[in-house]
Structures are given as C-alpha cells and as structure tokens.
Image: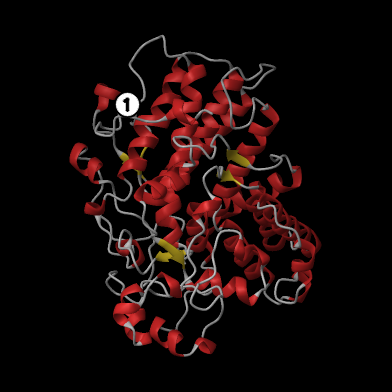
Amino acid sequence: MFAGMFLLTGCDLDINENPNYPSSEDITPDLMFPAAVNAIADCVGDQMFNYAGYFAQYFDQAPTANQYNDLAELKIDEGSDLFDRCYIYLYSGALADIQDILSRKVNASDAFACTVMRAQALQLVVDNLDFAPYTEALQASANAMPAWEEGKAVYEGVLAELDAAEAALGNDAITLTDPLLNKNLSQWKGYANALRLRMYMRLIDGGVNAAEYTNKAKALVAANNFFNGNVAWDVYSDASGQYSPWFGAYYRLGTINHCAAYPIVSYMLANNDPRIGAYLNKASKSDDYVGQLPGCKTLTGDWLGISSAYNNDYVSLVNYSALPAEPIYLFTQSELQFLIAEVQLRFNNNTAAAKAAYEAAVEADFASRGIGGAETFLASNRVNFDNQADKLKLIYMQKWTAFFMRNHMEAWSEVRRTDVPALSNQKAQDIFKDATIYIAGDMIEPGVNNIVGGGLAKRVPYPSRARTLNKNTPEAKLLSDRVFWDVK
C-alpha cells in the first residue's frame, strides 16, 4: 500500500543532495519519515539481500544464467558498483530525510524514532565499508566532500546519539506516519536496545572497549526491554508494482539466477530441517534438495562429464513464487533471541538461560515462516542444546540458518564476526568427489575465486560514485580487507 509512495527517483547526485523530493516546506516530516525507512529497508531487502546471499553462501549462480557470476566467483572491485545504489539510498535518501526532519524541531519521540533509523542506516554503511562519512556528512554545499571516519568511531557516535535521544524523551506521542512500528514508543525503545546489543557484540569482538560493552550487553539482557514480534517493513502485496523489491527485481529480469548453495542445503539436510522447503525447490533431476558448490557453476558440468548439458535441473532453485509480498526484516525476534543466548552463555555463564533463548530463537523463526514442528526439531540430536559440547557454535549455526531468506546482510556480518560457519579446509572439487570429507554447513572457498590469496568476501569496495565526487574517499580496499570488528 505504501510502496508506490516511497520509490526513490534520482540516482546520479552526490550524498549531500536528496533526490526524494523537492526542497519545500510543503514536504512534511510525516511524509519524509516513511520514505526514509523505505530507503533503508530497500537496501536491506534488495541489493544487500542479493549480494550478501552469495557471501553468506545461501545462493550460487544458477547454471543456465550469468547475471551473478561475479558474486559467486568474488570478482568484485570498485568498478562493480556493488554498493553504489545503497550508498545513494542511505545518504541522499534516508539520512538526508532524517536530517531534514530533525532540523524542523519535531517532538522528542519523533526525534528518537528518527535517531533509531539513523543508527540502523549508519550501522549498515560501516558493516559494508568500514569507514563512512559521519560528522561532516549531509552539509550540502557547506561541505561537499565530507571526511570519512573509522567505523568504530561511527558505531560509538551513533550509540551516543541513541542514548541522548532516549534521555530526552518525555510524554510525547509519536506523530510521524509509521508503518514500521505503528507509533508504539515502547517498540521503538525495544528496537533501539536490540540495535545496541547487535553493535555492542561487534564492538566487543572488534576489541573496542570490550569490558565496557560487555557490561552494557549484560545490562541490556538483564533489563529485557526489547521489541515484541519482528521489526519488519511489511508494506508489499502480490500485485504488479507493489511487489517486495527483491522479488520485483528478479521477476522483471525474467531469468532464473539463484540456486541454493551447497553449505546451507547440506546443513539443513543433515538436521532434517523442515524449513528447507519453504524457499527452495527440489532439483528435478534427482527429486532431492541439491546445493551447488560455491563458485562452481562453470566447473560442475566438467566434473559430471556433461559440460554442455549441465543445467538448472541438477540443482535446487530458489522458489521465487513464495516472495512477492515478503516483508523486509530489519530485525527479527529470532536474531534478538540468538544474541541474548550468546550473552547468557559467553558473559553470564548461564546455560539454562542460554538454552531458553536459543530455543525461543528457533521457535520464533519457525513461526515467522508459518512452519510447525519446532519442538520436535529442537529435540533432535544435532540441534538439541543439551547434547552439544560446543553450545556457542550451535547458537551461531542456527542463527545462520534462521537468517536464510530473512536478513542476508546480518547473516554475512555474523559469519564474519563469529567465523561460524567455519571455512572448510577442503577444496570444492574434493568435496564434490567425496562428500564425506566435508562438515555439513562449513563455508567453502569458491571453486573459481578471484580473491588473490583465496578466502571469502570480508567487505565491499567503496562506491565508485564516492570516488568520483569526494576526494576524501579512502584509498581503495580489496574484498579481502576486513572491517574493524572482524579481527579473527
């Protein structure tokens, strides 16, 4: 219902200009706020959903198409323009809108909601690029080339902004149009706390004031003041022009580009996970779920001895038909409960509380997909909390599973933060020859890998638009260069 209102138009301006609306007092904060949220959601649910789906090894390039060979084979540099549209949407769209709203002296509750979304947007920029324009950004002609600041400084800056905005709250009601959380200030506070917890964990594992942020994470979990349900941008429908953006983009392409990657299929099959059929089709050749080894589209046909005949029949394709009206999940209850489980286990040494949160996380994910059987699944040997010697790894692995077809950006970030799933020490061709040497769910280095020295994607390159328009853009980075919190 709102999708048509929030389409962003201009995409060829710098980040100090806003393409969403003419500069006019007639454009009210009530209209700008949902446009800002939509811009952030579009990035999470479209571009990031796509490329992070490859990086988290949920997707591989389907055999009979070629749109995303470079993602599967990690052939990406600044010329790939992987982050350019997100950069424009986040800065010229969401952050400029939010800045405009805040400049109009809205009430404290409206300002708080805006600050929460500002934190969400800048968290995404840092998790992709590490450095980001921050204190000098959004000054228009007063500073057309803002400095880029270290990711840890941006993280700590937006966390301080959240604290100040919450401290300023009084008895005001939210007046902005709010399809995200329906003007429920308690839900906005809970969302803010969840964002804090997500960022605290990355600061801790990045070695930034780890003791301080550990105490803050423990305090958040003890207070348990979080959102109910999911924080989801649920404004789409199964009607032309109102589709969820990722579906709409690939529906319009008219090609089948996404098949399942080997790691997610192998792990779900090993666990007899009933969620596997929610978004994947069985391979028609075998009538079973089959994941393609990452970056191996051009190799698999040779390995099978059917090079020219290798096609989509051999792999599990993504079931696009399940996706037209799919919400965009900015923060799921499942992710939140997994974070709580981690804090309880790592910092509180409270196994019972960690188990309760872990099980709540899995149950929340099953419920969000409309799938029954969570209790039976949790009782099974491989995912039963009590049965696992490495309970933290189980939490991380099931979080990775729950992010599938929900929030691929956060999945990729958590894989980088935790190093779970681990990177297999087996090569793709060796796994193809003998699957018994492979630990189900491990990440696999792409069979065709354009990262010099090997490995997996650790960041995205700086936007070429930023390189062109801002001389202060940092020197180019490689896909293998880590963001500040990825130190393992």
- Compared to residue 400, the image places residue 427 above or below, namely below
Q: Identify the residue shown where x is 48% and y is 19%.
A: 31
Question: Would you identify the image quadrant in which residue 418 lies?
Answer: bottom right
Q: Position of residue 363 (x, y in %)?
A: 73, 56
Q: Identify the residue shown where x is 43% and y is 44%.
A: 248
Check disc 1 and report the residue beneath it: 19
Q: Quadrant of the N terminus?
A: top right
- Compared to residue 324, the image places residue 72 above or below, namely below
Question: Would you identify the image quadrant in which residue 231 lies?
Answer: top right
Instruction: Work out whether residue 428 or residue 94 is closer to the camera in this orientation and state it.
Output: 428
Does residue 346 show up? yes
Q: Identify the residue shown where x is 44% and y is 85%.
A: 432
Does residue 208 show up? no
Question: Would you identify the image quadrant in which residue 140 lies?
Answer: top left
Q: Identify the residue shown where x is 53% and y is 37%.
A: 236
Answer with left or right where residue 467 lies relative to residue 197: left
Q: Position of residue 276 (x, y in %)?
A: 61, 65
Answer with left or right where residue 380 lies relative to residue 174: right
Residue type highlighted by circle 1: Pro
Instruction: Work out whether residue 241 or residue 230 is closer to the camera in this orientation and state it.
Output: 241
Q: Position of residue 159 (x, y in %)?
A: 53, 38
Instruction: Work out whether residue 439 or residue 374 is closer to the camera in this orientation and state it.
Output: 374
Q: Secondary structure at mark 1?
A: loop
Q: Position of residue 65 (x, y in %)?
A: 33, 63
Q: How many marks?
A: 1
